[in-house]
Amino acid sequence: MSRRHALLHLDTTAGPAEIRISAAVFDCDGLLVDSESIWLNMISDWLAEHQTPQAQAEDFLGLSVDDTAGRLAEHFTSEDEAGAIANQLTHRYSSLLGAGVSPMPGAVRLFSALAKQVPVAVASNGLRVDVTAMLSNSGLMDLAQAVFTLEDVAAGKPAPDLYEQACQHLGAERKQAVAFEDSPAGAQAALAAGLLVVGVNANPQIKLPCTHRVESLDHIRLREQHVPSR
């Protein structure tokens, strides 16, 4: 059985590159939608409220609510409080997202174009109610073949579970699938799952374990593939 493929041109931080893929898996927060700043500001406010100068909001970039709560509990009080902190963060974040978020530059264009050529999924450390709301508001929900969130796996990113499940659902070989990630935890998860990883982050201070790196999704284009006539 023949499989569909897409040829991507990337204007990477190291120069032009091209990759041929049979499936694509996107992170959501900070990659498809501009929710990352909301998350970081919320964590920064929490740290200030609880006077924890030894931690910085950027330390929790890409982590799930539960993993974040566990780390905050270590700084603030005890691990016994992690559940209560997770509940606080969940309610705060959902409330803030309710005000609406915007798609990231190039997200709708690239996601839509890829969905016409290869199977596309979303793999997020967020909660399903938040992720589906953000994707719906951005017009991307109906384009995704599948959406996997923290509730669907035993362990969130940086564990590889989300990407393994996404590839299994799409019927894609991991070495022929690409993951788009903007956080260290997400990039680590995709790399551990065996996917080709495109890191998407304009901040050089953020270290991403990835195959290629671009500053934004606007730096990625689909290349037309010429099929020889018979």
Image (cartoon, grey):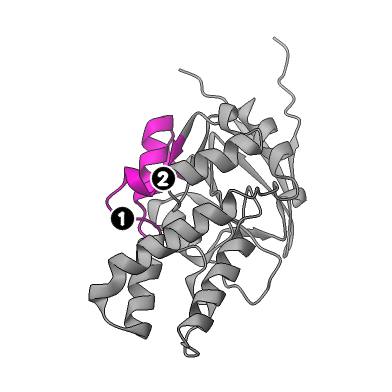
Q: Position of residue 207 (x, y in %)?
A: 57, 72
Q: Position of residue 39 (x, y in %)?
A: 56, 63
What amino acid is at disc 2? Thr
What amino acid is at disc 1? Ala
| Residue that protrudes farthest toward the left in the picture | 80
Q: Is 220 placed left or right of 134 in the picture?
A: right
Against 105, is 170 above or below? above
Using the rendered view, name the quadrant where residue 66 is placed: bottom left
Task: Tell me the residue that label 2 is attached to.
Answer: 149
Against 201, is 81 above or below? below
Q: Which residues are magenta?
A: 147-175
Please say if the residues under marks 1 and 2 sit with CB atoms less than 8 Å apart. no
Which of 173 and 91 lies nearest the eye of the viewer?
A: 91
User: Does the magenta run of residues contain 207?
Assistant: no
Q: CA distance from mark 1 to mark 2?
A: 10 Å
Secondary structure of the residue carrying tag 1 is loop
Residue found 72% across the figure and 61% down from its top = 215
**Number of residue marks:** 2
Residue found 43% across the figure and 58% down from its top = 90
Q: Position of residue 68 (x, y in %)?
A: 40, 68
Which of 127 and 110 lies nearest the eye of the viewer?
A: 127
Task: Tell me the residue that label 1 is attached to.
Answer: 155
- The crowding category of the residue bearing disc 2, from other C-alpha atoms within 10 Å (few below 14, some 14 to 19, many at least 20), is many
